[in-house]
Image (cartoon, rainbow, N blue to C red):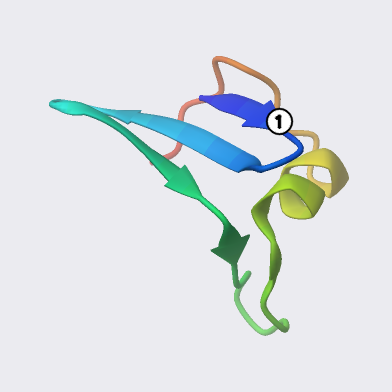
Amino acid sequence: LGVDRDGVLVGTGEGAIRLLEVQPEGKRPMPAADWARGYGVVPGTRLD
């Protein structure tokens, strides 16, 4: 997992995908980078 101003880069079994926007449960869609900063996501965090 990596975070930059463009979004959140998530590693997969076959490469990586960049999340540009996320929608936390019960909330409005938001830029993925803002979500990561607000929720304390740091490089190396595992998303289950």
Q: Indicate the quadrant containing the C terminus: top left, top right, bottom left or bottom right.
A: top left
Residue 37: image location, x then y, percent: 83, 40
- Up the image or down, 38 lies above or below 27; here it is above
- Up the image or down, 16 lies above or below 28; here it is above
Residue situated in front as seen by the camera: 30 or 39: 30
- Binning the other alpha carbons within 10 Å of mark 1 as few (below 14), some (14 to 19) or many (20 upward) gives few
Quick one: SS at disc 1?
A: strand
Residue in the picture at 75% in, 53% down = 35
Residue 14: image location, x then y, percent: 13, 26
| Residue at far left of view | 14
| Residue at far right of view | 38
Residue situated in front as seen by the camera: 31 or 39: 31
- Up the image or down, 23 lies above or below 37; here it is below
The residue singled out by tag 1 in the image is 4
Name which quarter of the figure residue 45 lies in: top right
In the picture, measured across the screen, residue 17 lies left or right of residue 35, that is left
Name which quarter of the figure residue 29 lies in: bottom right
In the picture, measured across the screen, residue 15 lies left or right of residue 40, that is left
Residue in the picture at 42% in, 33% down = 10
